[in-house]
């Protein structure tokens, strides 16, 4: 790919992720992205990305592969240590996502976009387009199965999706709140939110299902 093409694509992606994060995915048209990215050719976005969905995938693909690579590395380190606990697995799984809070190249915008997707606030379905980003047979799911062996599989996947939504919405909240605080207080508040988030994710993973939930699982099965 030519250098000028790469530069143009990067510029459009950077502008689009900011607009989608701040104005909502469905609240921004391709024409608005074209104008904001100073593209003289009105068909530039179609040429480079094919569609709005293609542009969304370019934004996701800018961030997600790096997150997954770091996550798998951290997970493997925990597994190799021989001291595998649910807390360590969860910390390893979410640390690369948490790092997006400090990523100046659109990290917080990415978090805000995925939070929208997790809330179904868009017609774009992330896991239909990129199912590999939450595979039921990746290293994370295998580790969670081992640590929550008594959890019914359907309920485990349901809770994973709830945890996914909580993770991104909490990180967006952290980004918004800490942006208004002094730097020293900022770091302490941020760590408090993160530690509490991990506590909450552990509770989601391990809470014994109620009789009512088990009844509904049996009926659904």
Image (cartoon, helix red, strand yellow):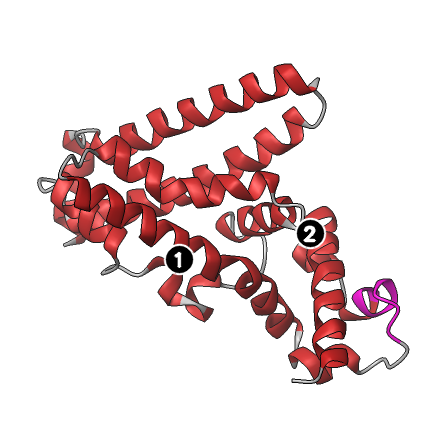
Element carrying mark 1: helix
Residue tagged 2: 24
Rendered location of residue 216, percent (x, y): 19, 43
To which residue does mark 1 refer? 69
Residue visible at 64% across and 16% down in the picture: 184
Would residue 150 appear left or right of 109 to someone viewing this image? left
Q: Which residues are magenta?
A: 32-39
Quadrant position of the N terminus in the picture: bottom right
Classify 10 Å Cα crowding around label 1: few (below 14), some (14-19), many (20 and above): few
Q: Nearer the viewer, mark 2 or mark 1?
A: 1
Q: Specify whether 129 is left or right of 138.
A: right
> Is residue 123 in sight in this rendering?
no
Mark 2 touching mark 1, by CB under 8 A? no
Q: Main secondary structure of the magenta part?
A: helix
Location of residue 56 (image quadrant): bottom right
Residue 24 locus on image (x, y percent): 69, 52
Viewer-proximal residue, 159 or 192? 192
- In the current view of this chain or complex, which residue is farthest to the top? 185
Give above or below for 174 relative to 15.
Answer: above
Number of dots carrying numbers: 2
């Amino acid at each position: 790919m030519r250098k000028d093409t790469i530069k143009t694509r990067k510029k459009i992606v950077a502008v689009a992720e900011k607009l989608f994060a701040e104005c909502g995915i469905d609240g921004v048209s391709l024409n608005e992205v074209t104008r904001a990215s100073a593209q003289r050719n009105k068909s530039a976005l179609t040429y480079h990305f094919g569609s709005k969905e293609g542009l969304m995938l370019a934004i996701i693909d800018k961030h997600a592969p790096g997150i997954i690579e770091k996550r798998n590395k951290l997970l493997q380190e925990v597994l190799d240590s021989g001291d595998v606990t649910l807390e360590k697995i969860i910390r390893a799984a979410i640390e690369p996502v948490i790092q997006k809070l400090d990523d100046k190249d659109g990290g917080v915008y990415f978090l805000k976009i995925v939070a929208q997707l997790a809330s179904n606030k868009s017609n774009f379905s992330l896991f239909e387009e990129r199912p590999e980003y939450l595979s039921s047979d990746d290293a994370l799911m295998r580790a969670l199965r081992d640590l929550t062996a008594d959890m019914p599989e359907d309920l485990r996947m349901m809770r994973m999706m709830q945890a996914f939504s909580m993770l991104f919405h909490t990180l967006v909240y952290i980004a918004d709140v800490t942006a208004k605080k002094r730097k020293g207080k900022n770091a302490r508040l941020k760590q408090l939110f993160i530690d509490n988030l991990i506590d909450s994710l552990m509770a989601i993973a391990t809470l014994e299902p109620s009789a009512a939930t088990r009844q509904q699982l049996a009926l659904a099965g």
